[in-house]
Image (tube, rainbow, N blue to C red):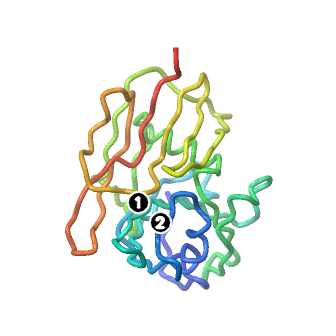
Amino acid sequence: MAVIHETTLEPSKLELLTAWLPSRPWYSGGPGGPELAKAGGFRLDDPDGEVGIEFIVVTDTSGARPATYLTPLTYRGAPLDGADHALVGTMEHGVLGHRWAYDGCHDPVLAAQLTALLEGRAQAQDQNITGALDREVTRSYRGEALTGTDFVPTATDDRDGTVLTMPHGASLRVHRALHPGPDAAPPDAVGHIAGTWTTPDGTRTRSVLAVLHAAPR
């Protein structure tokens, strides 16, 4: 179980994301850079207790209209080999020391646990309270087990989000730009994950966060 420490971070997570988001293909904010506020999110546990896994939802008000982004992050005590392209930044944690923060879609630990959540083998954890479940995160899945214990995904970013290619050709699309809407799986999907976040006017809303499609036949 991940322990959430009440301590300092330098720089903060929002400061890291402010510098990193404009480099992403799905970013649509103003030319002066993001103006971010936290809008929601949840955590997943690493079974080995080594990697912090957090899905942060942020809203950017720098553009002509607010934009909301899903930013999955992993926190590590040492660099992840071969993942320099996915490094969001480093920070100093008041308890754990120097930490490396990665775009979690490119981290095999997050990908494996996101798949476990999709299949119902893992549960979403509250973003701020140690040991509490986030029951607003829902999921569905129909089919056989997707992965083994040695699962390493292939992650590809595009203007709509990130696609994780699963064994046997299945694809899990993680939405990075979020929009309020139905939280059920699309008709052509074999699984999905949905969650709740807060709009700039204070309204709680839901949307699909990730959708699984079977391999083409």
Pointer 2: residues within 10 angstroms few (<14), some, or many (20+)?
many
* Amino acid type, callout 2: Ser
For residue 197, what is the image quadrant? bottom left
Q: Which callout, 2 or 1, points at the residue further toward the start of the chain?
A: 2
Within 10 Å of disc 1 (Cα), the crowding (few <14, some 14-19, many 20+) is many
Kind of residue indicated by mark 1? Phe
Q: Is residue 174 left or right of residue 83?
A: left
Q: Position of residue 89 (x, y in %)?
A: 67, 72
What residue is shown at x 38% (from left), y 67% (from top)? 67
In this figure, which residue is indicated by the disc labeled 1?
42
Tag on residue 28? 2
Image location of residue 76, percent across then percent down? 67, 64
Residue at the spot x=48%, y=47% of the render? 174
Q: In the figure, 53 relative to 22: above or below?
A: above
Q: In the structure shown, which secondary structural element does the residue marked by tag 2 occupy?
A: loop
In the image, what residue occupies the spot 65% across and 78% down?
91
| Circles 2, 1 touching at the beta carbon (< 8 Å) | no
Q: Nearer the viewer, residue 52 or 10?
A: 10
Please provide percent x and percent y for residue 126: 37, 61
